[in-house]
Image (spheres, rainbow, N blue to C red):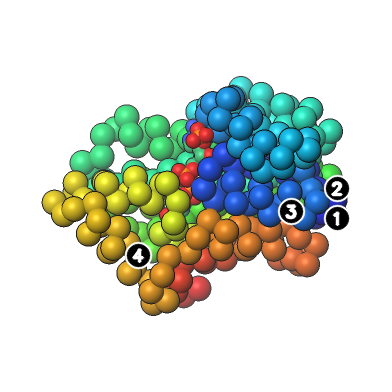
Amino acid sequence: MTKWDEAKVLVTGGTRGIGYAVAGLIIESGGQAAIVGTDQGRATLAAHRLDGGQGRAHGIGARIDGTEASAARLVNDAVRAMGGLTAVVNAAGGATVGHALETPWSTWQHDWNVKFWGYFAVIRAAVAHLPAGLGVVVNVLGITGKDPNPRLAAATTINGALRGLTKILADDLAPRRIRVLAVNPGATDTDLLRLMAEGYAALQNISREQALAGLKASGPLGRLPTARDIAQAVVFLLSEEARMITGTSIDIDGGSHRGPA
Ligand SMILES: NC(=O)c1ccc[n+]([C@@H]2O[C@H](COP(=O)([O-])OP(=O)(O)OC[C@H]3O[C@@H](n4cnc5c(N)ncnc54)[C@H](OP(=O)(O)O)[C@@H]3O)[C@@H](O)[C@H]2O)c1
C-alpha cells in the first residue's frame, strides 16, 4: 500500500468490533478510513469517536445486501469522502449459530447476501478505484473456512467460499499488482461473540455464561483474540512491508486451527 499518511481505506463493518479496530489503527498511523455500518447516525458517531472530529474518519450508513447497486453506492460515498481509495477491508457480517438442515432458508440467504455477496460486490465496485501497484484488499473471513464447524453451518460455507474467491482475485489482479488477502479469526472478543454465545446456549441447552466460557477456552493459548489482535494482522497485510504477500490468509485464532496451515 501507499504511505500511511496517504492511505484511504474503506472498512465495511467499521462501526464496531474488528472493523472498528482496523479503522482505529489506520487513523493512528495517519491515514483516512471510511467506515460502513447499517445506520448513518451510529456510523457518524463511531467516526467521531475514532478521530475526535479531525475529518480523517468518515461514517457511511449503508445496508449491505449483496446487490451491486448497494455496493456501488457505498464505494462511491467512500471515494467522495476520502478523495480516493487505496485499500478495502471487508468486515461487515456475522455468524449465525445453527446446523445446516435446521438453519432457516431465509437466514442462509441473508448471511450469504451480507457476507459472501456483500464482500464480492464491494470488491467489484472498488477495483476500478484502486491504484495499480498500491491497491490492497483484505477480507475478514473466519477459521471455520478452514475448520468446518457444523454448528456454524452458514459461516463455514461462506468463509470457505471467500477463501477461494480471495485466491482467484489475487491471481486476476496480480498483473495490476493489486494484492488480495484474508485473515481467519477464531472466536474473537466482540459483540458478535456474545451473540454467538446466546446461539450456542440455545442450541446446547446451557447458560450463556457456560457457552461464553466454552468459547473462551477453545484455543491452546487459552484466551480469546481481541478485535485489536485481528486488526494488527490486517494492518500488516495492508502495509508496504507485506508487498510480496498475496492470495493467502493468516489465522489469528490462538492456535485452534487443526490440520495444514
Ligand atoms: N467475532 C468473532 O468471533 C469472529 C470470528 C470469526 C470471524 N468473524 C468475522 O469477522 C467479521 C467482523 O465481525 P465482528 O466480530 O467485528 O462483528 P460485530 O462486532 O458484530 O460487528 C459487525 C459490523 O458489521 C456491520 N454490519 C453487519 N451487517 C451489516 C450490513 N448488512 N450492512 C452494513 N454493515 C453491516 C455492523 O454495523 P452496525 O452495527 O453499525 O450496523 C458492525 O460494524 C464478520 O465477517 C465475522 O463473521 C468474527
Residue 208 falls left or right of residue 261:
left
Q: Please, what secondary structure does the residue beneath circle 1 have?
A: loop
> Which is closer to the viewer, label 3 or label 4?
3
Whether 63 is drawn above or below 10: the answer is above
Real-space CA distance between mark 1 and mark 2, rounded to the nearest whole angstrom: 5 Å
Amino acid tagged 2? Glu
Residue 86: x and y in percent read: 79, 45
Q: Earlier in the sequence, mark 3 or mark 4?
A: 3
> Which is closer to the viewer, label 3 or label 1?
3
Rendered residue at 78%/38% (across/down): 54
Amino acid tagged 1? Lys
Are dots 3 and 4 in contact, CB under 8 Å? no
Q: Earlier in the sequence, mark 2 or mark 4?
A: 2
Look at mark 2 in the image and give the residue it sits on.
6
Residue 114 falls left or right of residue 102:
right
Real-space CA distance between mark 2 and mark 3, rounded to the nearest whole angstrom: 13 Å
Q: Is mark 3 within 8 Å of ligand 1?
A: no
Real-space CA distance between mark 1 and mark 4, rounded to the nearest whole angstrom: 37 Å
Q: Is mark 1 within 8 Å of ligand 1?
A: no
Q: Please, what secondary structure does the residue beneath circle 2 have?
A: helix
Q: Earlier in the sequence, mark 2 or mark 3?
A: 2
Residue 193: x and y in percent read: 38, 51
Residue 3, numbered circle: 1
Residue 72: x and y in percent read: 66, 27
